[in-house]
Image (spheres, helix red, strand yellow):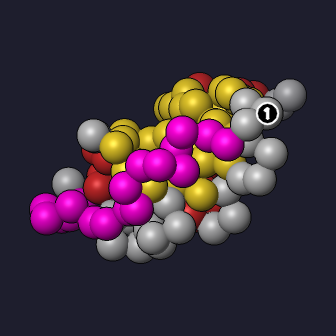
Amino acid sequence: MNTENQVQQSQQQILSLRFFSDPGHGWLEVDMVHIIGLGLANKISDYSYMREDFAYLEEDCDMLMFINEAENNGILVNCISHYTNTDSEIRSFARYSPPFSTAKS
C-alpha cells in the first residue's frame, strides 16, 4: 500500500453497522442520526422499515444508496452480518417514513 492510500484511509471514519438477513431479504440497521446527517431522510423508500431511532434499510436500493453517500462523505461502512433461517422480525416493524425534521447538519 502506498503512503497516499494509507493517509486517505486514516482520514476516513469507520461506521460499523449490523446487517440482518433472512432467507428472503436483508436490511442494514442505521441510526436515524446518520440518515439525517447525510441528507437521505426523504430519499429512503417504504421498502425499508423503522423501529425507535433506527431505520432498517432494504438491501436492494436503500442500503446501497446509504453506503455510497457515506463513502462520498469519507465514511467507510463495515457490515456485521446476522442471519436467521426464519422470517426476520424486521418484517413486522413499521414501514419507513421520514421524520419531521430532516435538515442536514
Magenta stretch holds residue 90: yes
Quadrant placement of the C terminus:
bottom left
Residue drawn at x 45%, y 70% is 46
Which residue in the protein does label 1 denote? 85
Which of these two is toward me, 15 or 30? 30
Q: Main secondary structure of the magenta part?
A: loop
- Residue 98 rendering spot, x and y as whole percentages: 28, 66
- Residue 101 rendering spot, x and y as whole percentages: 13, 62
Which of these two is toward me, 105 or 57? 57
Q: Name the kind of residue labelled 1 in the image.
A: Asn
* Mark 1 surroundings: few (<14), some (14-19) or many (≥20) residues within 10 A: few
- Residue 42 rendering spot, x and y as whole percentages: 33, 72
Which contiguous range is marked in magenta?
A: 87-104
Mark 1 falls on what kind of element?
A: loop
The answer to whether residue 2 shows anywhere in this view is: yes
| Above or below, 14 relative to 42 | above
The answer to whether residue 14 shows anywhere in this view is: no
Residue drawn at x 67%, y 43% is 87
Q: Residue 8 falls in which quadrant of the image?
A: top right
